[in-house]
Amino acid sequence: MAAHQRKEAVNMALEAKEVPQHVRMLSSELNGSTLKIKPALNCSLGELFQYRDVIRSALDAEEVHDSKQWVRYKVMFVPLEAAGLALSTTIIKAGIEESIGAKLVRAPHRLRHGTGAEDELWNHVQFAVLEEDKVRRPRAVAIAGVEYQVTEFVDKRRKSPCSRCLGFHKPFATGCHNPARCEHCGSEAHKTEDHTCKHCAGHGARTCPPVCANCNGPHRADDQSCKLAPRMNKHARCWLVPSHGQAKAVRNQGRIDHQKAVQALATERKEISASSAAAAGDKGDDDAGVGSSMDMEVTPPGSA
């Protein structure tokens, strides 16, 4: 079944069960025998997985789990081969399950890292178990007779803002209840598609500089340049957020940067308007000159 067919099947099944309209599936990604489901923008995973039976029936799946309830670990430096034996996913999975005494919620997979020739000979391997299984954190696992160190997996990917309030907060099981904000200016007074202001009036919708809902800078909340976005500390392996004082300074600087962006846009528009007016004036002068020459041509000789 193609991705768009999976989406249609799930959403039609949810609609048939008279599930609230905002509880829908946005997309899905197939990873081996595991299907990763992403909820719609205004829907949380918790809300969507309240209807896991509907999803399982629509996709004809054996089981549906919320990935937020997974506990993930990382097996360090697993080579592609050991003693001439290719360490396939099946062999790795069997070794991990035997070592921890529990079933994995999905097939383990190798993580990407460096691109050098030496780096291509090994990978770290991620695996996940259900939190409800209460698996004791393993220190090592045996794969094909060789033990490998295990550490807790820390997701170092950049944190995305909430699709509703645009803030950087933890996902709630019942969904975000904060007021929805305009993605262009961060206002709670209107939706993104209804945005209008004095800076974009007469120039088209959302042509003014955007305003970050977090730092007040001239960019959208999901921009990677936002200085209030949580940053990963690779040494402590944890997310760091600015202190109250740092956040206040960042927001003040963001307001200044946004004012500069507005002024730069106003200057650019004035220059374009002046150039257009000058071009129109030159064209008018040329038209007037052509009219005078025509009058002279039609004047009868000797009438002066």
Image (cartoon, rainbow, N blue to C red):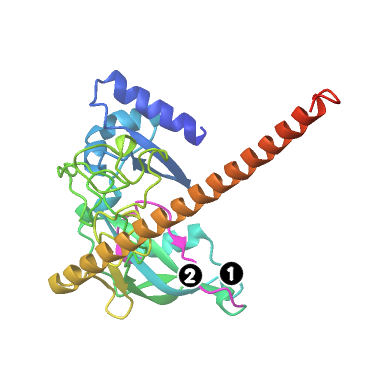
- Residue 246 vs 103, above or below: the answer is below
- Residue 252 vs 181, above or below: the answer is below
Q: Measured from the top left, where is residue 129 in percent x and y?
A: 30, 56
The foreground one among 135 and 2 is: 2
Instruction: Residue at 34% x, 28% y: name it.
Output: 57
Three-letter code, disc 2: Ala
The foreground one among 239 and 134 is: 239
The foreground one among 276 and 21 is: 276
Q: Measured from the top left, where is residue 92 in percent x and y?
A: 46, 63
Label 1 element class: strand
Q: Which residues are magenta?
A: 99-116
What crowding class fits label 2: few (fewer than 14 Cα within 10 Å), some (14-19), or many (20 or more)?
some
The image quadrant of residue 95 is: bottom left
Image-based side of 204 in relation to 193, left or right: right
Residue 91 visible in the shown view: yes
Label 2 element class: loop
Q: Measured from the top left, where is residue 198 in percent x and y?
A: 30, 43
- The verdict on residue 144 being magenta is no
Image-based side of 144 in relation to 163, left or right: right
Q: Quadrant of the C terminus?
A: top right
Instruction: Residue at 22% x, 65% y: name it.
Output: 251
Image-based side of 112 in relation to 12, left or right: right
Three-letter code, disc 1: Leu
Q: Which residue has dot 2 on it?
A: 144
Q: Which residue has dot 1 on it?
A: 85
- How many marks do you count on the picture? 2
